[in-house]
Amino acid sequence: MARYVGPACRLCRAEHTKLFLKGERCNSPKCPINKKRPSPGKGPRERMKKMSDYGIQLREKQKLKRMYMLLEKQFKILFDKAERMKGITGENLITLLESRIDNIVYRLHFASSRSQARQLVNHGHIKVNGRRVTIPSYLVRENDVIEVHETSKKLVNIKESLKQFSRSGVSPWLELNPDEMRGKVLALPRRSDVTELADVKEHLIVELYSR
């Protein structure tokens, strides 16, 4: 499957916000957003142009899509599923994005970024309810138990990532036992639980797909 393999920081600069694609670097002074570097490939005159309504909606979709490292087809499949669910489509979309197993692995601090979490899932290092899951798009459910496979608990990357738990904890809808490298989904996330997306206006994405 095709995927973006270019510089991750370039995507953050394009969206003028942190997408948290490079783990600890995103919270360090080295982050290009902290340095207020301009968008890639744009001169001063281009940056001054006013965006159309369509352009604003498109940028919001690109921001969310890039944050979760999804391609357009993957993102649209989730949006269509969110639209069929009861409730507000935009909030349903956030819940589905957060429920992906690669995101859960990232939220539980088994990985320092979503791209690293996806790699762990692809390589069979993660189990859900005692069974290996190798599909990053797998959607977890309430009360699911997510853990690192026994043979993978010695991996240095996972041990280093878990150190973040003592500094920031986990999301309120998750619980984690860092010693056993095991977590549990207490409930599916609500929109208000995902503070990282406070600046995301998901209703603009709904408007974009409704055109």
Image: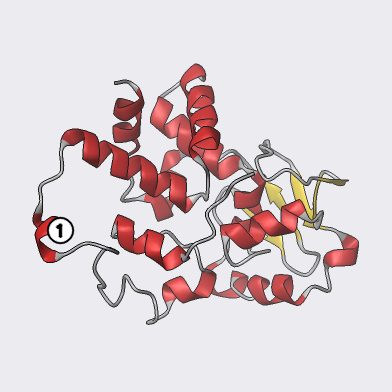
Closer-to-camera residue (177/99): 99
Quadrant of residue 41 in the image? bottom left
Q: Is residue 68 left or right of residue 38?
A: right
Find residue 4 and report its horizontal and vertical position in percent. Answer: 52, 54
Q: Is residue 7 left or right of residue 159?
A: left
Q: Is residue 38 left or right of residue 143?
A: left
Q: Is residue 207 above or below residue 99?
A: above
Find residue 159 and report its horizontal and vertical position in percent. Answer: 72, 74
Work out which quarter of the rendered image holds the C terminus and state it: top left
Disc 1: CA contacts within 10 A as few (<14), some (14-19) or many (>=20): few
Find residue 55 and report its horizontal and vertical position in percent. Answer: 23, 39
Closer-to-camera residue (30/182): 30
Q: Is residue 3 above or below residue 94?
A: below
Work out which quarter of the rendered image holds the N terminus and state it: top right
Question: Which amino acid is tagged 1?
Answer: Arg
Identity of the residue drawn at 46% across and 66% down: 7
Quadrant of residue 169 in the image? bottom right
Find residue 83 and report its horizontal and vertical position in percent. Answer: 46, 21
* Viewer can see residue 18: no
**Residue lying furthest right:** 151
Q: Is residue 42 left or right of residue 81?
A: left
**Residue lying furthest bottom:** 29
Q: Is residue 60 above or below residue 204?
A: below
Closer-to-camera residue (147/172): 147
Q: Secondary structure at mark 1?
A: helix
Identity of the residue drawn at 73% across and 53% down: 121
The residue labelled by disc 1 is 47
Quadrant of residue 11 in the image? bottom left
Identity of the residue drawn at 50% across and 26% down: 82
Identity of the residue drawn at 33% across and 46% down: 200
